[in-house]
Amino acid sequence: MTSTSYELHDPWLLLLAVPALALLAWRARRRGSAAAIVFPSVARLRGLRPTLRQRAAALVPALEGLALLGLVVAAARPRQGDSRTVVRSEGIAIQMVLDRSGSMEETMRYGGAERKRIDIVKDVFQDFVRGGKELPGRKTDLIGLTTFARFTEESCPLVSTHEPLITAVKNLRTVAPALDRYDQPVWDLRGIDMETARRRGLKENPLNKTAIGDGLQRAILSLVSAEEDLGRGEGQGGYKIQGKVAIVLTDGENNAGDVDPVEAGKYAASNGIKVYFILFAETTVTQRDLFGRRIVQEIPEDQILETPRQVAGESGGKAFLARSGDELREIYADIDRLERSDVGRIEYRSYREKYRWFLGPAIALLCLAAVLEQTLFRRIP
């Protein structure tokens, strides 16, 4: 960023204008004092109008006054400063790892209403990145998005300008949980289980799996490669990574992929990447007994967070359980407080001296005033 401004190197020298103008006024008044040699009286001519030449004689002190002001300003050294600001952001590289399996279409409580999990995640994610609803935003951080179901996808690379990331989140769709007889995706199962869906002619979508380990592994590779790319250009100034973070969000357990989530957590730790693991799920399980009665069982938190804690603990991160959208927002606020970044600003300024703009005209005005005073407006005495 470049800006131009004008300033005086020694502005206090402008005070010299006061005695200089006072001296000029005293000199002008002295011109009208009584002569040392007495001449015949011209008192009878006082009633005559002054000629144009006599009126123009006032031009000499005016020129001298302007010249003195020009000299004073030139002494104060006016200059033009061209400042070039280089913003060095020392931020955090954050890779968001989001589950987009079909179960993310199920509803949870958020803001006093039932909403789909994927819609809640989109809402909280955007506030986490841009700021809003008590979240300050991550304006100086590199943020990318990795999504996963059966397979992983880098939905958005690490970017410092977050609009492409927000667009990618808004356009994010889950994997359809079922396929019809023509192998077309079906998202709306209206709360029915897969057994009921099969009786209606639907079949389970083979892509609707949860490969947490693969998703985390892909995110780690993105963070490592981004740091290497920035490291090669660090000498030119720009962005410097303070830390690397992966935030995994899922509503289920790992049931696909080639990489175990715990092994992925160890790989993150070996590359200096901190992992935060968010399990966005309810802790109750509804089953039916032999008589068809519904039985609701509560799963202990320690049991449901056992694997997430192993994944996050390897890297010094933390595991969270969000039972509602409001708890999810609070968790992102906690992560935001744990991982903060700073912005450094270096300003380079170069100057071009502009005193010649005032010194040259001032000397010219003094010369002109001296010539006029000794020629056209010469007085005797």
Image: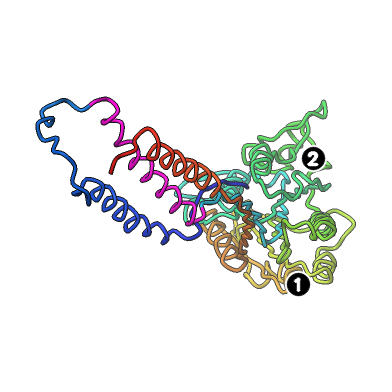
- Would residue 66 be counted in the magenta stretch? yes
Magenta region, mostly helix, strand or loop?
helix
SS for dot 2: strand
Q: Where in the figure is residue 289, as x and y percent of width and height?
A: 65, 56
**Callout 1, which amino acid?**
Ser
Query: Which residue is the site of mark 2?
Result: 204
Instruction: Name the residue located 85 percent from the left edge and 67 percent from the top edge.
Output: 267
Number of other residues with Cα within 10 Å of mark 2, as a class: few under 14, some 14 to 19, many 20 or more = some
Tell me, yes or no, if residue 88 can be seen here: yes
Identify the element where label 1 is drawn: loop
Q: Is residue 132 left or right of residue 289?
A: left
Q: Is residue 293 visible?
A: no
- Indicate the position of residue 300 as horizontal and vertical percent values: 62, 70
Name the residue that disc number 1 marks.
Answer: 315
Q: Which residues are magenta?
A: 51-77
Question: For this view, does 125 lie left or right of residue 136?
Answer: right
- Which of the 4 image quadrants contains residue 332? bottom right
Mark 1 vs mark 2, foreground winner is: 1
- At label 2, which amino acid type do we have? Glu
Query: Which label was assigned to residue 280?
Result: none
Determine if the magenta segment contains residue 303.
no
Classify mark 1: residues with Cα within 10 Å, few (<14), some (14-19) or many (20+): many
Look at 80% across and 60% down and name the residue there. 235
Which residue shows up at 82% across the image and 42% down it?
207
Work out whether 282 lies above or below 60: below
Left or right position of 286 against 259: left
| Location of residue 342 in the rendering, given as x and y in whole percent from the top left corner | 61, 64
Mark positioned earlier in the residue sequence (1 or 2) = 2
Rounded to the nearest whole Å, what is the CA distance between mark 1 and mark 2? 36 Å
As rendered, which of 344 and 259 lies closer to the eye?
Answer: 344
Q: Nearer the viewer, residue 23 or 191?
A: 23
